[in-house]
Image: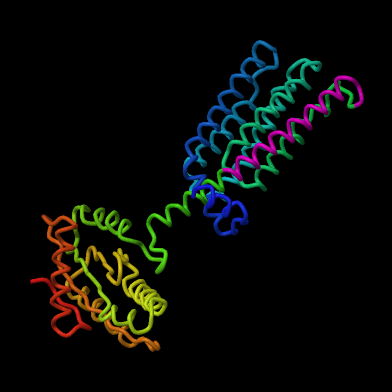
C-alpha cells in the first residue's frame, strides 16, 4: 500500500503552493541547525584569522572585528527570522560576507598556499549550503558568490593550463557538481517525504468523502480544547444528525446519500468555521465550541438548521442537533453521551431543531 501511494506521489510534480509550504516547514524545523552552522562558521573563521594574524604575521587590523561584527549581526538576525524566503536572502548575504572575510584572511598566507586554501574554503561553504533548507535560487546564488569570491585563479600564482591549474579546475568543477547534485537530491527527497507524510496524515485524520476531519481527529483536537485552562467562557458540544437519512439512501441510492453528506459537511464547515468539527461516522457529525456563551451556541445551532433547511437542492433534508454544556469534570466521552441524549430529544420532538441536554 505504501509503495503504491509513493509511486503515485512521485509521478506528480508538487504544486508551487505546496513547495512554499514545504520550504517554510523545512526552515522552521531546521532553524536551530542553521544557527549552529552560522555560529560554527564564524568561530572557525575567527580561529583561522587569529592564527594567520599572529603566527603568520599578517597583523590583526580593524577589518577583523568589522567582519566578525557583520557575521555576528547576521547570525543574530537569523535567530529572529521566521520566514523561509527571508532566510534565503539572509543566507546569500552571509555567504557574501563570509567569502569576502575568508579571502581577506587567505590573502595573508604565502602565495603558494593560497589556491589550495581557497578551494578548501569553497568546499566547506558549499557543503554547508547543501545541507541548509535553502531554495534552489538561494543555493545557486551561494554557489556563484563562492566561486567569484574564492576563485583560486584570481591574484594567485597558479596557471589555469598548468598541471596544478588543470587539477584545481577539475576538482572545482567536480566539487560544484557534487554539491549541486547532493543539494537537489536531498531537497527532492525531503519534499517527497513531506508530501507523503502530509498525504498519510490527511488519510488518517480526514474523512475522505466529506473532506472534513474524522472521528480520530475530533477526539484529539476536542480533548485538547477540553483540557485547556483557564477557560474564559463555557465549552459546548453539539451532535448533528441528518433527519431521515436512511430513507434518502433507500429511495435515491447511496450516491445521492453521499451528495447529501457532502452538503451537510459543507454547511457545518461554513457555519462552524471557528470551531472544531468532524464527521463521526454515518450521518452523524460533531462540533466542539470552546470559549462561547450559551446565546452564541443557540444562534449557531439555529443558523445551521436554517442553512440546511433552505438549501435549494433537488434532495432537501433537515438536521437535528443535540447540545450540551461541557462541565469542567466531564470527559469527552461523557460530553458526547450527554449531547447524544439531547439529540435523541430533538429527534423525538419533531426534528429540524436543536435541543439542550437537561
Q: Nearer the viewer, residue 144 or 297?
A: 297
Could you tell me residue 311's position as x and y percent? 36, 86
Is residue 99 toward the left or the right of residue 344 in the image?
right
Residue drawn at point x = 19 percent, y = 60 percent: 232
Residue at the extreme front? 250
Is residue 141 toward the left or the right of residue 159 in the image?
left
Could you tell me residue 67's position as x and y percent? 62, 31
Query: Taken as a whole, is the magenta stretch helix, strand or loop?
Result: helix
Quarter of the image that includes the C terminus: bottom left
Q: Nearer the viewer, residue 93 or 213?
A: 213
Residue at the extreme right? 161
Q: Nearer the viewer, residue 133 or 147?
A: 133
The quarter of the displayed image where residue 159 is located:
top right
Residue 266 lies in magenta, yes or no? no
Residue drawn at point x = 42 percent, y = 64 percent: 208
> Which region shows up in magenta?
161-189
Is residue 155 toward the left or the right of residue 233 in the image?
right
Could you tell me residue 142's position as x and y percent? 68, 40
Q: Is residue 187 above or below residue 293?
A: above
Residue drawn at point x = 75 percent, y = 34 percent: 147
Residue 177 lies in magenta, yes or no? yes
Residue at the extreme left? 358
The quarter of the displayed image where residue 117 is located:
top right
Q: Is residue 261 above or below residue 211?
A: below
Is residue 272 toward the left or the right of residue 159 in the image?
left
Q: Is residue 15 above or below residue 191?
A: below
Amino acid at each position: 500500500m505504501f509503495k503504491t501511494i509513493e509511486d503515485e506521489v512521485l509521478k506528480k510534480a508538487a504544486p508551487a503552493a505546496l513547495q512554499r509550504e514545504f520550504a517554510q516547514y523545512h526552515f522552521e524545523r531546521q532553524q536551530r541547525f542553521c544557527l549552529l552552522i552560522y555560529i560554527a562558521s564564524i568561530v572557525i573563521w575567527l580561529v583561522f584569522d587569529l592564527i594567520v594574524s599572529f603566527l603568520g604575521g599578517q597583523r590583526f587590523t580593524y577589518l577583523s572585528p568589522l567582519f566578525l561584527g557583520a557575521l555576528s549581526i547576521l547570525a543574530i538576525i537569523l535567530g529572529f527570522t521566521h520566514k523561509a524566503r527571508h532566510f534565503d536572502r539572509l543566507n546569500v548575504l552571509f555567504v557574501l560576507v563570509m567569502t569576502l572575510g575568508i579571502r581577506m584572511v587567505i590573502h595573508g598566507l604565502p602565495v603558494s598556499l593560497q589556491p589550495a586554501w581557497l578551494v578548501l574554503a569553497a568546499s566547506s561553504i558549499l557543503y554547508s549550503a547543501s545541507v541548509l533548507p535553502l531554495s534552489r535560487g538561494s543555493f545557486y546564488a551561494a554557489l556563484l558568490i563562492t566561486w567569484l569570491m574564492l576563485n583560486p585563479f584570481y591574484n594567485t600564482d597558479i596557471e589555469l593550463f598548468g598541471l596544478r591549474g588543470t587539477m584545481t579546475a577539475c576538482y572545482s568543477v567536480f566539487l560544484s557538481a557534487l554539491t549541486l547534485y547532493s543539494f537537489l537530491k536531498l531537497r527532492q527527497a525531503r519534499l517527497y517525504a513531506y508530501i507523503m507524510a502530509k498525504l498519510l496524515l490527511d488519510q488518517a485524520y480526514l474523512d475522505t468523502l466529506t473532506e472534513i476531519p474524522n472521528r480520530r481527529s475530533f477526539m484529539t483536537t476536542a480533548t485538547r480544547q477540553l483540557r485547556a485552562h483557564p477557560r474564559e467562557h463555557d465549552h459546548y458540544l453539539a451532535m448533528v444528525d441528518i433527519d431521515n437519512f436512511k430513507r434518502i439512501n433507500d429511495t435515491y441510492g447511496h450516491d445521492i446519500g453521499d451528495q447529501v453528506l457532502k452538503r451537510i459537511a459543507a454547511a457545518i464547515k461554513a457555519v462552524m468555521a471557528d470551531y472544531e468539527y468532524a464527521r463521526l461516522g454515518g450521518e452523524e457529525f460533531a462540533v466542539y465550541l470552546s470559549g462561547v456563551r450559551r446565546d452564541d451556541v443557540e444562534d449557531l445551532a439555529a443558523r445551521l438548521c436554517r442553512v440546511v433547511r433552505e438549501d435549494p437542492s433537488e434532495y432537501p433534508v433537515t438536521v437535528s442537533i443535540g447540545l450540551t454544556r461541557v462541565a469542567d469534570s466531564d470527559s469527552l466521552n461523557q460530553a458526547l453521551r450527554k449531547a447524544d441524549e439531547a439529540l435523541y430529544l430533538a429527534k423525538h420532538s419533531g426534528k429540524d431543531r436543536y435541543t439542550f441536554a437537561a
